[in-house]
Image: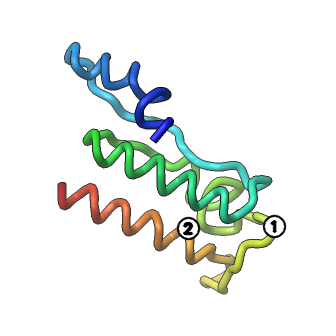
Amino acid sequence: ARLAADVYLPWRELEAQGVGVHCGELGVYNRTPPEVTYAFLDDLLSIFNANGWGGALWNLRGAFGPLDNGREGTKTEPCGDHQLDRQMLDLLKRRITQAREL
């Protein structure tokens, strides 16, 4: 609620003036615990969806993405030659689906 009310208020004010809003880089660095990462991404993407804003994940593979992120404590599964953070991928897919339905 604090993010939506305080942090993104200036974005909503700009949008009210006719400025388009898109977050060109978003993500959570791999030194952040998995449960914090998922909660933050879920909150952030729900705010973006509620406001009709787009965003781009920093990377698919690497420190911010669902592939080969090396995040300690993350449950991964093999995906070809990579390790997949299924929980992050499912969260991203769910929020993308919700955005399309709005």
**Residue 62 got which mark?**
none
Quadrant that contains the C terminus:
bottom left
- Describe residue 48's horizontal placement relative to residue 39 as left or right: left
Q: Residue 47's quadrant in the figure?
A: top left
Colouring style: rainbow
Residue at image position (62%, 76%) is 84
Secondary structure under the numbered disc 2 in the rendered image: helix
Q: Quadrant of residue 78?
A: bottom right
The percent coordinates of residue 80 (x first, y second) are 62, 84
> Label 1 neighbourhood size at 10 Å, few (<14), some (14-19), many (20+)?
few
Is residue 55 or residue 43 the one in the foreground?
43
Amino acid of disc 1 = Glu
Q: Which residue is mark 1?
A: 72
Rendered residue at 75%/60% (across/down): 33
Residue 76 point in image, percent of width and height: 68, 80
Residue occupied by mark 2: 88
